[in-house]
Image: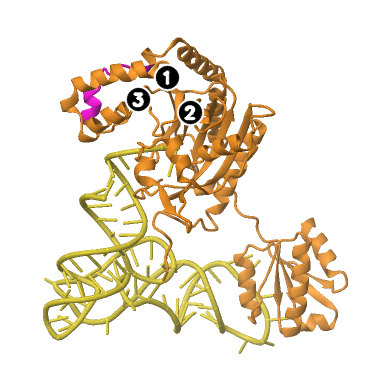
Chain colours: A orange, B yellow
Amino acid sequence: MIQLIRGFKDILPGEVELWQKIEKTAVELLEDFGFKEIRIPIMERTELFARSIGEDTDIVEKEMYTFPDRKGDLLTLRPEATASIVRSYIQHKLYAQDPVRKFYTIGPMFRRERPQKGRYRQFYQINAEIFGVDSALADAQLIFILATLFARLAVTDVQSHINSLGCPECRPDFKESLSKFLSGVKERLCADCNRRQIRNPLRVLDCKVPACKEAIEGVPSILDSLCPECHRQFEILKNALERLDVPYVIDKRLVRGLDYYSRATFEIKTGLLGAQDAVAGGGRYDGLVKTLGGPDIPATGFAIGFDRLAELIAVSEVDDARTLDIFVAALGEKSRALAFEWSCALGLAGIQVEMDMGDRSLKSQMKRANKFAAKHTLIVGEKELEQGSVILRNMATKDQVLLPIENLVENVKTKVEGS
RNA sequence: GUGGGUGUAGCUCAGGAGGUAGAGCACCAGGUUGUGGCCCUGGAAGUCGCGGGUUCAAAUCCCGUCACUCACCCCA
């Protein structure tokens, strides 16, 4: 038997309704806030991700599905969506009419990690991006939208964490004082952190090894070395969130795994998913549009882990599927042919209908009608047909009426809709 | 990539100091001649994840492998 690829999954009926509900809720909310949908390809040239996410990141170093196509071009299954959206924004000069643009997109991403709870090799994200707004009000709006979405989906065990990563003005100074501090506690850091200390010292802040956490107690906070403008923007963000009643915690150790982030970063965390506690994350990436060859336009955005969000919502929360309006039970060959025509006509008329196409006893067809929770059953029997009528049974009351074959579909429709 | 746990019918699981398998639910058919939900009877369904080894004999022991799962790691 051929099985699906490791870390990939099927979303089957029963679960997919929840996904539809989440998607519908998110899309409505984003549209209300002026975001437009953008659909981008699932593959890009590898270079796009290497340059945007960063050569030294784990994603680019060891998690991407990269392969040469038949002509030898290096392609990669997208590990995230922002790079593609930025590429599209630049390529189609979407900034030309108005640099301020808001986009959202929903789709699968691919990262070859060891599968785990809330972590799949193909996983889905809902992304939202705001281009052309320098003010931290844009960041505040994104966090507000996230908080609203979770509230609408009745997800309660979540918390917003925010931090500022500074900008090219002030981050170098911070990195320097951080490096100085880290080399002082070098012996107490794990092997990974010692490696990070040189390549990407910010990542040490995010280490989960207890000894490291201890060693960096009292580490200088980037929030203390922000330049005046970064500081001002962070204040704007905090004030806006307070006025919007969005609770948050400042997490000065919150660092993003992608290189393009600057200033505001945030993560929505939950206590319900074990180690994979980030349900959504994002932040500002002011330099990325320019890095990828576009004009110097600021931008900010977020990504929601669709799979993780779905796991936070109890299956019972999903509305039950529509119950069946009518089940058509036919007895005998001739009846079945007619019943088939009528059931198709009923479906066309917007009545949710089901029939048994096999040659089965009335008893088993009734059982089936019951399983579908049909409100009515239309019994098409040879005896009644001879008299030009069929039986309509109300499953709840057990009332049965004879309906003439003439205008049957219309008659059934009014009966069904009237009850 | 590293470590732990798990892998028996569609689903949830039992069994197993070695002698080729069970339950509940679901499914199908009956319980008199054309009517559901309860109940009763019967039936179908598994190469006991896959491959190899030990053995007269393996679902049961050993090795490998794959998958799932949790943690590390990483992030959404």
x, y percent for residue B4: 21, 52
**Left or right placement of residue B59 versus residue A70 in this view:** left
Query: Upstream in the sequence, badge 2 or badge 3?
Result: 3
Query: Upstream in the sequence, badge 1 or badge 2?
Result: 1
Determine which of the numbered discs, if any, sits on residue A253 in the image. 3
* Residue range (magenta): A211-222
- Inspect the magenta stretch and tell me whether residue A220 lies in it: yes
Q: Nearer the viewer, residue A316 or A10?
A: A10
x, y percent for residue A61: 35, 42
Q: Which amino acid does label 2 sit on?
A: Gly
Residue lying furthest right:
A406
Would residue A15 be visible to someone looking at this image?
A: yes
User: Local crowd at mark 1 within 10 Å, few (<14), some, or many (≥20)?
Assistant: many
Q: Are marks 3 and 1 in contact (CB under 8 Å)?
A: no
Give the number of the mark in front: 3 or 1: 1
Q: Which amino acid does label 1 sit on?
A: Gly
**Left or right placement of residue A35 versus residue B13 in this view:** right
Q: Pointer 2: what residue?
A: A283
SS assignment at label 2:
strand
Determine which of the numbered discs, if any, sits on residue A64 in the image. none
Count the marks. 3
User: Local crowd at mark 3 within 10 Å, few (<14), some, or many (≥20)?
Assistant: many
Q: Pointer 1: what residue?
A: A166
Q: What residue type is labelled 3?
A: Arg
Residue lying furthest front:
A71
SS assignment at label 3:
loop
Looking at the image, residue A394 lies above or below residue A365: above
In the image, what residue occupies the spot 62% across and 43% down? A24
Q: Do the residues labelled 2 and 3 touch (CB within 8 Å)?
A: no
Q: Nearer the viewer, residue A318 or B34?
A: A318
SS assignment at label 1:
loop
